[in-house]
Image (cartoon, rainbow, N blue to C red):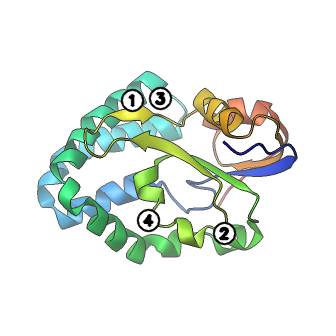
Amino acid sequence: MKSYGGNMRVFDFDNTIYDGESVFDFFLFCVKEKKSLVKYAPIVVYTTLMYELGFLSIDKLCELASRMSKVIIDNKDNAESLIEKFWKTHAKNLKLDYLEQLREDDVIITASPSILIDGIKDKLNTKNIICSEMCIETGKLEFLCFRENKVKAFKERYPNAVVEEFYTDSYNDKPLMEISKKTYLVKK
């Protein structure tokens, strides 16, 4: 745990630094690579829509993550390869204006799983990245970094820090907005 006591800038990842929802884009990419995954499309599209509209509860998101983790377990032998291929074609979705302003001491916090974000973290200009955590061996969702869990994760990692500025695209991040001095809503 880093004991940082200063003011920090915090950035959401999806639709803020990354243009789109990286998990949804990764799913579509995987469907192209493995056509049998198309059977999961309706639940993924529905869940993404409910998330975007702010109607998705943590319980429902955990339920979907558990269902989808089975898919990851079944394909874990080529997961790293798929993630590497995905970022080769989707790194272009990183918003350069945000990447250029990221500093080493900034924090990126996201509901996306670390297994996906680890594939691009070398381009993010900061090592302070907080993600959802899933065990790739068991497929168990260990921590969902979503809504109030983002605040919990931030405070665990940086107990004395103050969020000076927070950049996000979504009111799903209201709990983190509430502990920030300034919040910026990002649009395309």
**Amino acid under label 3?**
Leu
Q: Where is residue 85? Give x, y as percent.
A: 32, 73
* Disc nearest the viewer among 4 and 1: 4
Q: Where is residue 137? Give x, y as percent.
A: 25, 44
Q: Which residue is mark 1?
A: 62
Q: Which residue is mark 4?
A: 119
Q: CA distance from mark 1 to mark 2?
A: 29 Å
* Disc nearest the viewer among 1 and 2: 2
Task: Say what secondary structure mark 1 lies in.
Answer: helix
Looking at marks 2 and 3 on the same chain, the residue that comes earlier in the sequence is marked by: 3
Q: Quadrant of the C terminus?
A: bottom right
Camera-side residue: 47 or 133?
A: 133
Camera-side residue: 42 or 129?
A: 129
Dividing the picture into quadrants, the one containing residue 158 is top right
* Disc nearest the viewer among 2 and 3: 2
Residue at (16, 46) in percent of width and height = 39
Q: CA distance from mark 4 to mark 1?
A: 22 Å
